[in-house]
Image: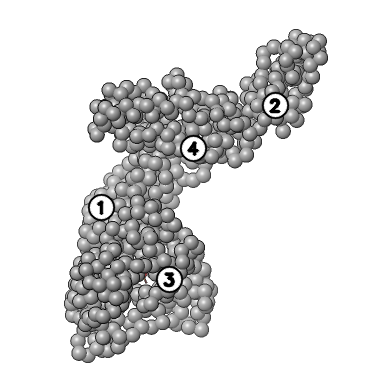
C-alpha cells in the first residue's frame, strides 16, 4: 500500500476509535492496540511531515468538551506524555537526559495509573475547584463530582494562598467488580472497564451517582504552589503526602539499568496495585532541570511513559466449561494448564461465545497463546495448530442449560445464548430481585440479600412463593427482626394490588421494559386478553416491534411462564389493568360472534374486541351492538335479523379493527 493511503487509513481508523473511546467511553479495541497503531502513524508522519493533516489523531492531545459542564482553563497545562515501548527506547531517553544534563540526573519512576487526569485547586488551604484534563488547556469543571471522592482532602494543613495539584482519578478493581456484580443482579449492563467507569462517573451530571461509584485518586504532580518552592519532584510528592493527598508510589534512581529494572518490577507487581496501570512513567526529578529541558508542542521533554505490551504465554486447553450467568447467558471458558501472567497465575480464559470459539477454532487439547493486557480476565490470542493433537473435534455448545437442563436459545439480536428455564436456579436470584424491584412489583425491603437467603433456606423457588411467606419464616433470616419481617410481609401483601403493567414488567419478559409493560397493560386490560393475543396483534401496538412481539409470545406460551402466572393468580395477585385503555373505539359496545371466521379464531377475535374497550357476549339480545357473522352462521344470525341488530361480515369487522 502507498504510504499516503496507509496514513489515511490509520487516521480514519484511529479517529473512529478515538471517538468511541474518548467521547462515547465505549472502546472496542484494547488501549494497547490503539497506542500501537498511533505509534505507527506517528512514525509515518515523522517520515513524511508534509502529509500530516489537521484531523490526524496525533494533532490533538485529548477529548472534546461535552455539554453540561462549564469549561475550566488550566493555568498550568496538563501535558500528555511521550510513549516508549521497549527497554532500548528507555535507554535512549536516559542518554538524551544525561547529555543535556551533564552534572548528573536522578529519575522518579512511577506506575502509570489508568484513569483520567484532573487538576485540583486550593485557595488558602481549601478545595475550591477541580477539572478534567480536556485538551490539556481547557477542561470541564467537575468540582461537585470531585467532592464526592473521599480521598480528596477538602482542606489542607497548610494554608498557602494557592495550590494546584494534578492526579489520576480511577475506580479500584475491587469497586469495579462489586459494582458489576450489583449491576448484574439488577439486570443492568456491566461497566466496560475501570477506566471508562471512572470517566463516565466523573462526567455524571448528578453528583449522587458519582458518589455511588466510589472513585479514588492518586496525586502525581504539583502544578503550582504560591509561597513555597521545591528543588525536586520527589520533594513535592512528599509535601503533597504531608498535605494529606494520596500520592503515587514512586522510587528515585540514577542509573539507566535501575530505571529499566524498576519498570519491569512495576509490571511484575501490577496486580498488587488496587488500580489498573497501563505503564510506568519515568521523570527527571530535578525541577530546575525540567525548566531547562522544556517541552515540545505536545510533551514535556523530561519524561516518558513506558507502555507495557500484553504479556503472552503458551498454555494447553484442558477443558471448555459453560457457566450460566444470573441473566441466563451461557458463557464458555477455557480451563488451562496454569501459567504465570502479569503477576498472577492464570488457570482459565474467557471464550465469550460460540462465534468466538468457532472463529478461532479453539478445541479441547489445543495449545494456545494466552494474553493479559491489563484486563481482569485473560484471553486466548490464537491456537497453535502445529501442536493440535489427533482426534480433536470442533467445540459445540450444549443444547441444554448445564444447570437446569432447559433448552438453550440464541438471541435474535446477538451472539448470546441463553437458558430458557424460567426457574433455572442460576437465574433465580436475579429474576426474583427484578420481580420485587421498585419499577416492577415494588416490594420494599425485598432486595438481593434477603432473596438470596430465602432461596438458600428453600423458602422460595419462584416469585409466586413470596406470597406464601409467613412473618415467622422471614424473621429467622439474618439481620431480620420481627418488626422488619412484618414490614416485609406487609409490603408483599400490598404488591398484590399492583397494576398489571408492574406485574408484566416484573415477569422479566425479554425486550419488555417498563414502558412497554405499561402500554401492554393499557391496551389489553387483562392478563387473559394478553395471553390470547397473537403475534400479529401484538405488532400492531405502537412501541411493540416484531422482535418484542415474538419475545412476548415465546414467553407467554412457555409452560414455565404459564405455570408461574397460574401460581401468581392463585396467590391473589391482580391480573387487571388500572390504566386507561388507550384504544377505546368499541367502548360501551357488545359484540356477538357467530359462524366460522377465516382470519381469526374466536379467542383472538374476542381479545381484539376487548383490547379496544368492547365486550363479547355469548348470545344475542336487544343489548347487542353488532353480530359478526362468519361462514355457516346459525341461530344467532337469525335472532339478530329478528331484533334488527346490525350484522357485520368478516370483512366489515376487519375494517373496523384497522
Ligand atoms: P497518555 O494519556 O498516554 O498521553 O499518558 C499521559 C497520562 O498518564 C497523563 O495525562 C496522566 O493522566 C496519566 N498518568 C497516570 N499516572 C501518571 C503518573 N504517575 N505520572 C504522570 N502521568 C500519569
Q: Residue at x 42, y 54 (%)?
A: 206
Q: Earlier in the sequence, mark 4 or mark 1?
A: 1
Q: Secondary structure at mark 4?
A: loop
Q: Nearer the viewer, mark 1 or mark 3?
A: 3
Frontmost of labels 4 and 1 is 4
Task: State the CA–CA distance, disc 4 to disc 2.
Answer: 31 Å
Foreground residue, 622 or 22?
Answer: 622
> Disc 2 or disc 3, which is closer to the eye?
3
Q: Residues within 10 Å of mark 1 (few under 14, many from 20)?
A: many
Residue 634, x across and y down, in percent: 75, 11
The quarter of the rendering in which ligand 1 is drawn is bottom left
Q: Which mark is on residue 510? A: 4
Q: Is residue 314 left or right of residue 575?
A: left
At 49% across and 45% down in the image, what residue appears? 414
Placement of 437 over or under 254, stated as above or below: above
In the rendered view, tell whether residue 117 sits above or below residue 397: below
Q: Secondary structure at mark 2?
A: loop
- Marks 2 and 3 close (CB-CB < 8 Å): no
Label 1 sits on residue: 346
Whether the residue under disc 1 has CB within 8 Å of ligand 1: no
Q: CA distance from mark 4 to mark 1?
A: 35 Å
Tell how many labels. 4
- The answer for how far apart the CA atoms under marks 1 and 3 are is 44 Å
| Horizontal side of residue 126 vs 6, given as left or right | left
Q: Which mark is residue 72?
A: 3
How would you rate the neighbour count of disc 3 (Cα within 10 Å): few for under 14, some for 14-19, many for 20 or more?
Answer: some
Q: Nearer the viewer, mark 4 or mark 2?
A: 2
Amino acid at each position: 500500500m502507498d504510504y499516503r493511503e496507509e496514513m489515511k487509513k490509520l487516521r480514519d481508523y484511529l479517529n473512529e476509535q478515538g471517538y468511541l473511546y474518548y467521547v462515547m467511553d465505549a472502546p472496542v479495541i484494547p488501549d494497547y492496540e490503539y497506542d500501537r497503531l498511533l505509534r505507527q502513524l506517528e512514525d509515518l508522519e515523522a517520515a513524511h511531515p508534509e502529509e500530516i493533516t489537521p484531523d490526524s489523531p496525533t494533532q490533538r492531545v485529548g477529548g472534546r468538551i461535552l455539554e453540561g459542564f462549564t469549561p475550566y482553563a488550566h493555568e498550568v497545562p496538563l501535558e500528555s506524555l511521550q510513549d516508549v515501548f521497549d527497554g532500548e527506547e528507555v535507554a535512549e531517553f536516559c542518554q538524551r537526559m544525561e547529555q543535556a544534563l551533564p552534572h548528573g540526573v536522578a529519575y522518579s519512576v512511577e506506575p502509570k495509573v489508568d484513569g483520567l487526569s484532573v487538576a485540583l485547586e486550593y485557595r488558602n488551604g481549601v478545595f475550591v475547584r477541580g477539572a478534567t484534563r480536556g485538551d490539556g488547556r481547557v477542561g470541564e469543571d467537575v468540582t461537585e463530582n470531585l467532592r464526592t471522592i473521599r480521598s480528596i482532602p477538602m482542606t489542607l494543613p497548610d494554608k498557602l494562598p494557592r495550590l494546584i495539584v494534578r492526579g489520576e482519578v480511577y475506580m479500584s478493581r475491587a469497586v469495579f467488580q462489586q459494582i458489576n456484580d450489583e449491576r448484574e443482579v439488577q439486570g443492568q449492563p456491566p461497566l466496560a472497564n475501570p477506566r471508562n467507569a471512572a470517566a463516565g462517573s466523573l462526567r455524571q451530571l448528578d453528583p449522587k451517582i458519582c458518589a455511588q461509584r466510589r472513585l479514588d485518586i492518586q496525586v502525581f504532580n504539583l502544578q503550582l504552589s504560591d509561597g513555597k518552592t521545591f528543588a525536586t519532584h520527589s520533594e513535592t510528592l512528599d509535601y503533597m503526602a504531608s498535605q494529606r493527598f494520596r500520592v503515587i508510589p514512586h522510587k528515585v534512581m540514577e542509573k539507566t539499568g535501575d530505571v529499566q529494572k524498576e519498570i519491569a518490577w512495576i509490571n511484575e507487581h501490577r496486580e498488587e496495585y488496587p488500580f489498573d496501570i497501563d505503564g510506568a512513567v519515568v521523570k527527571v526529578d530535578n525541577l530546575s532541570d525540567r525548566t531547562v529541558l522544556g517541552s515540545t508542542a505536545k510533551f514535556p521533554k523530561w519524561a516518558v511513559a513506558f507502555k507495557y505490551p500484553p504479556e503472552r504465554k503458551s498454555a494447553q486447553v484442558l477443558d471448555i466449561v459453560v457457566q450460566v450467568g444470573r441473566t441466563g447467558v451461557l458463557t464458555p471458558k477455557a480451563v488451562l494448564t496454569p501459567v504465570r501472567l502479569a503477576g498472577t497465575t492464570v488457570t482459565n480464559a474467557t471464550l465469550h461465545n460460540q462465534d468466538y470459539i468457532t472463529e478461532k477454532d479453539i478445541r479441547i487439547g489445543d495449545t494456545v497463546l494466552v494474553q493479559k493486557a491489563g484486563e481482569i480476565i485473560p484471553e486466548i490470542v490464537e491456537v497453535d495448530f502445529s501442536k493440535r493433537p489427533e482426534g480433536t473435534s470442533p467445540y459445540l455448545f450444549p443444547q441444554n442449560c448445564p444447570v437446569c437442563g432447559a433448552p438453550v436459545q440464541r438471541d435474535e439480536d446477538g451472539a448470546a445464548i441463553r437458558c430458557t428455564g424460567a426457574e433455572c436456579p442460576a437465574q433465580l436470584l436475579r429474576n426474583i430481585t427484578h420481580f420485587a424491584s421498585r419499577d416492577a412489583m415494588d416490594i420494599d425491603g425485598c432486595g438481593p440479600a434477603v432473596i438470596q437467603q430465602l432461596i438458600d433456606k428453600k423458602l422460595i423457588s419462584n416469585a409466586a412463593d413470596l406470597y406464601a411467606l409467613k412473618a415467622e419464616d422471614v424473621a429467622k433470616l439474618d439481620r431480620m427482626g420481627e418488626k422488619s419481617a412484618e414490614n416485609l410481609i406487609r409490603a408483599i401483601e400490598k404488591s398484590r394490588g399492583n397494576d398489571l403493567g408492574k406485574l408484566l414488567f416484573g415477569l422479566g419478559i425479554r425486550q419488555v421494559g417498563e414502558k412497554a409493560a405499561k402500554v401492554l397493560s393499557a391496551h389489553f386490560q387483562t392478563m387473559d386478553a394478553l395471553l390470547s393475543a397473537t403475534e400479529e396483534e401484538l405488532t400492531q401496538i405502537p412501541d411493540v416491534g416484531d422482535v418484542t412481539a415474538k419475545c412476548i409470545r415465546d414467553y407467554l406460551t412457555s409452560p414455565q411462564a404459564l405455570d408461574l402466572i397460574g401460581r401468581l393468580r392463585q396467590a391473589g395477585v391482580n391480573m387487571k389493568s388500572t390504566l386507561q385503555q388507550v384504544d377505546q373505539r368499541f367502548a360501551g359496545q357488545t359484540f356477538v360472534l357467530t359462524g366460522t371466521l377465516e382470519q381469526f379464531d374466536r379467542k383472538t377475535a374476542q381479545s381484539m374486541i376487548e383490547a379496544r374497550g368492547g365486550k363479547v357476549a355469548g348470545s344475542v339480545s336487544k343489548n347487542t351492538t353488532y353480530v359478526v357473522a362468519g361462514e355457516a352462521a346459525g341461530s344467532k344470525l337469525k335472532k339478530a335479523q329478528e331484533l334488527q341488530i346490525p350484522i357485520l361480515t368478516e370483512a366489515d369487522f376487519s375494517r373496523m379493527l384497522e
